[in-house]
Image: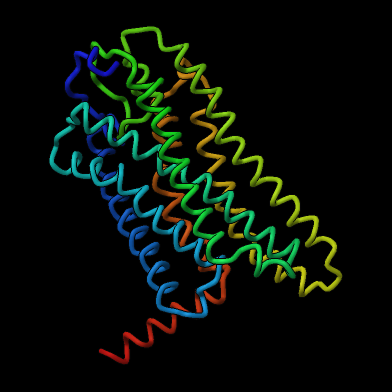
Amino acid sequence: MMNQSTVARFILKGFSDIPAVNAVCTGIFLIIYIWGLLGNISVIMVIIKDSHLHTPMYFFLKNLSFLDVCYTSVTMPKAIANAILGSEDISLPECVAQLYLFFALAATECFLLTAMAYDRCTAIYRPLLYGVSMNKKVCWELVSTAWICGALYSTLHTITINTFSLPFCGPNVIDHFFCDIPAVMRLSCADYHANEELSFIYTSCIIMGAFVLTLISYICIISTIAKIQHVQGRWKAFSTCSSHMTTGILFYGTGSSMYLTPTSNYSPIQGRLAALFYSIITPTLNPVIYCLRNKEIKGALMKVYHQIQRKN
């Protein structure tokens, strides 16, 4: 249980062990973080303001952008503030909260990507039933389910039967820029292998289950697109789904490389690099991926930009 821990505070080592490199990384990731916030908030505001974008696809995209804002804000502000202020401390309650929220939001993104894949699959595979199958109620139910499942998954993963059920007796230095499960688990003064095996089992069942459902949706999408005879129609159908596939590949690819490998094989450098991809780079790229390949989003953004110009 958590009250067995004798460590009250942890020390986060930041983006790099070398001070000069850490300072440079802090500046770069501050810019990336701000860019990601502006990009995702812009997508949210454009979808809210433009009535033409009040469709299931953009409803899910709006929720994904909101999720990415929360997701990056769990880890990056603390890491950047620590680097700027020269403070490396994080209390045990802060570490628990950070790890819980990070994995709740990460798991929610997995489930939301599955819902988005299902939405695109229904639109292409069964277009005549799309309006009935993906009504407003169904969309809200899918998003709510994603958030609830993410919260429950993180509760199991971080508190109830895994990371913070272990005792921590020191040393208390986390070789990472935030409280990540492999880095924290390695600090336990008890044998963590049983917890690690349990973590692998339910991560494989739950998260990989969501991945398999997402993959099935994409297989249905690709097989349906391949049957379209007109090249123009085939390209239009593929372009609406390629952004979702790119996001899913980036997110699952970097995350699985980290959490489906044994903690005993954990490399601090590889851990930090992988974490940078799935904790800030991928969420920051999402608005770019969706906007570059989506004429409706680009058109709505230009409309808002011209409205602001006229007001000024």
- For the N terminus, which image quadrant? top left
How many discs appear?
0
Give the residue at x 54% y 46%.
250
Depth check, front residue: 44 or 186: 44
**278 in relation to 288, above or below:** above
**130 in relation to 70, above or below:** below
Q: Quadrant of residue 188?
A: top left
Check the image and name the residue furthest to the bottom.
310
As drawn, is 132 to the left or to the right of 290?
right
As drawn, is 226 to the left or to the right of 278?
right
Give the residue at x 40% y 53%.
68
Give percent across and percent down for residue 55: 55, 71
Give percent across and percent down for residue 311: 28, 90
As drawn, is 280 to the left or to the right of 246?
left
* Color scheme of the displayed model: rainbow
Give the residue at x 59% y 46%.
249
Q: Quadrant of residue 17?
A: top left
- For the C terminus, which image quadrant? bottom left
